[in-house]
Amino acid sequence: MSYTIERVLDCENHLGEGPIWDVEEGKLYWVDGTGRRVGKPAIWRYDPRDGKIENWRLDRDVGAMVLGRDRNAVLALDDGFYFFDFTTGKTELIGLVDEEQPRTRLNDGKCDRRGRFFAGGMDDKEELKICGLWRLDPDLSITKVDGGIICSNGPCWSPDDKTFYFADTFQEEIWAYDYDLATGVPSSRRLFASTKDDAGVADGSTVDAEGYLWNAQLISGDLVRYAPDGTVDRRISMPVKNITSVNFGGPNLDEIYVTSMARVKHPAVHDHFAVEAKPQFGAGSLFRIRGLGIRGVPEPRFAI
C-alpha cells in the first residue's frame, strides 16, 4: 500500500517527544524535552484544521505530558509529577521522585485506560541502571513499579490491556509485562524485542488497533512495526535519523505523527550518536504519515 510522509512543521525541536492526539479537541500535543536549554518552548499544540500552532515555555526539562479530564495536563518534569494549566502556563507540584539521584530525570510516559500516569526515569549520561518506573495514581500517590533502568521510553498497552510494553533505550531492549488493569501492576517482565543488531535504538512507541507495536528508532530513523510476537512486520524510513516518538491521530486515527530531535550535543558517555556540527536538514520537525490504512487507539486522559 502506498503512503506519504510529509513534514508538517519545521519546529526545530531540540528534543521533540511524546505526541498525543486529543480525540475530543482534534488537536496534537507534544513536548520538547530539553527545549528550555536552548531557549525554546517546551509544550506544543497543533490544530491540523487551520494550521494553528500554540506553545508554552517551562523552566525545567519535561519528559512527558498527559492530558487531564479538566482539559489541563499532568507533566513528568525532571524531578517529579506536576499539574499544568494551559491558561496560566503555571505548574503545581504533585510529588517528587528520585530525590537522591541528581543525575536522573523523568523521561517518557503515558496513561493506562484507568487514567494512571506511568513515567520512567533516565540517567542523563545514559550509562547507569539507576532509574525507576513510576506510577501516578488518581489519588495522587506515587509508586515505583520497576527499576534497574538506564533510559525509559515507549510505555504503551495492548488494546486488550493485558500487556504493558516498555523500552530501555540503552539496554537496547523492548520489554513486555503481564498487566493487571484492575491494580495497575505490571509483572513478569520479559524480552519482547532487541535492537542490539539494528542500526538504531528504541525510543517512543504506540500500539495500533490490531495490537501491533510501533516504535520510533533513534539514530537509524526507522519507524518499526512489531507483531504481537515481537517479530518485525515492517520498517518505514523517515526523512531524518533521530526520530523520537510516534502516535496515531487524525479524525479517523489513521494518520501517524512522528516527532524528532535537532540536538547534536549529547551528555552521553556512549558513542551511539554520530558527531555532528549542526543538525541534519529537517531534524526537530514534526512529520505525518498518511495512507497506511492502519488505525490507532485513543490515548487515555489522566483520571482527574
Image (cartoon, rainbow, N blue to C red):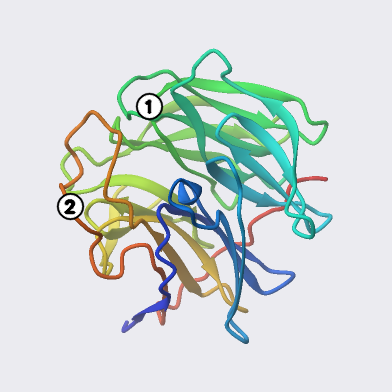
Identify the secondary structure beneath mark 2. loop
Image mark for residue 150: 1
Residue at 47% over, 40% down: 165
Q: Is residue 229 visible?
A: no
Task: Decide which of 21, 38 is in the foreground and name it.
Answer: 38
Q: Is residue 88 left or right of residue 231?
A: right
Q: Residues within 10 Å of mark 1 (few under 14, many from 20)?
A: many
Residue at 49% over, 16% down: 101
Residue identifier under label 2: 276
- The tag earlier along the polypeptide, 1 or 2, is 1
Q: Position of residue 123 (x, y in %)?
A: 40, 27
> Of discs 1 and 2, which sits in the foreground?
2
Q: Residue furthest top?
A: 100
Image mark for residue 112: none
Q: Position of residue 127 (x, y in %)?
A: 30, 24
Q: Residue furthest front?
A: 39
Residue at 57% over, 72% down: 253
Q: Exactly how many numbered labels are in the figure?
A: 2
User: In the picture shown, does residue 48 fall above or below 75?
Assistant: below
Q: Position of residue 78 (x, y in %)?
A: 55, 34
Q: Residues within 10 Å of mark 2 (few under 14, many from 20)?
A: few
Question: Which amino acid does the dot numbered 2 rest on?
Answer: Glu
Question: Which amino acid does the dot numbered 1 rest on?
Answer: Ile
Residue 234, image quadrant:
bottom left
Residue at 41% over, 82% down: 291
Identify the secondary structure beneath mark 1. loop
